[in-house]
Image: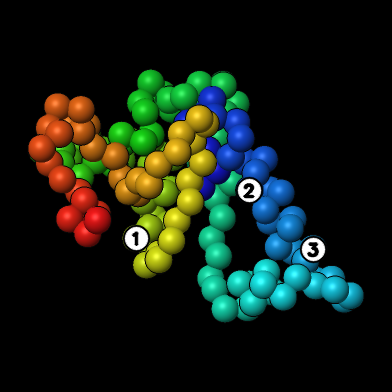
Amino acid sequence: SGELHGNERVGPSTLVVFMKLLLESYSRKENPNPWLKYLVDTRSIYIMPMTNALGYYQNRREEHNIDPNRDFPIDLSQSNLCMRTITARAVNELWREHLFQLAITFHGGMRAIAYEWGTVTERTHREKKSPDDVAQ
């Protein structure tokens, strides 16, 4: 995904350039990039250049004052407090439809391996380990 937070501008542009690279390389008659051609021929690639269009338009991180990255938490006791944004619902539907082996999301200024969901208690319950912590 290219832009979960509306004020993180690098994602949509990066993904449009990435799509252009894939399409132009794949359709090139002379000297196509064999690795990119193999990638396109052997993988299903889903690209969401902009998930939070309202936030992007308003240059705001949130959608209706809700952080979309915290709108699909895994440990909320009240289910009515998640999936309130169009952004979270769009990402959730894509993840529910497909089993992904790899996903990339662009966040401005962030370098991390992250899950497709956010958790509102991550700052207060550091003792909770993710499944990836066990595997490392």
User: Which mark is first along the chain, 1 or 3?
Assistant: 3
Q: Is residue 105 above or below residue 41?
A: above
As measured in the structure, the alpha-carbon distance from the residue carrying label 2 to the one carrying label 3 is: 14 Å
Of residues 44 and 37, the one nearer the viewer is 37
Residue at 40% across, 64% down: 100
- Which type of secondary structure does the marked residue at label 2 adopt? helix
Of residues 47 and 80, the one nearer the viewer is 47
Instruction: State the residue position of label 1.
Output: 96
Q: Residues within 10 Å of mark 1 (few under 14, many from 20)?
A: few
On the image, the x and y values in percent for residue 97 come to 39, 64
The quadrant of the picture occupied by the C terminus is: bottom left
Q: Amino acid at mark 2?
A: Leu
- Which type of secondary structure does the marked residue at label 3 adopt? helix
Q: Residues within 10 Å of mark 2 (few under 14, many from 20)?
A: many
Residue contact between numbered discs 3 and 1, judged by CB atoms under 8 Å:
no
On the image, the x and y values in percent for residue 48 come to 55, 50
Instruction: State the residue position of label 2.
Output: 15
Residue at 21% across, 51% down: 133
Q: Nearer the viewer, mark 3 or mark 1?
A: 3
Q: Is residue 21 above or below residue 73?
A: below
Give residue 95's quadrant in the image.
bottom left
On the image, the x and y values in percent for residue 79 come to 17, 40
User: Which mark is first along the chain, 2 or 1?
Assistant: 2
On the image, the x and y values in percent for residue 135 come to 22, 59
Instruction: State the residue position of label 3.
Output: 24
Q: Amino acid at mark 1?
A: Arg
Q: Any mark on residue 114, and which?
A: none
Q: Amino acid at mark 3?
A: Glu
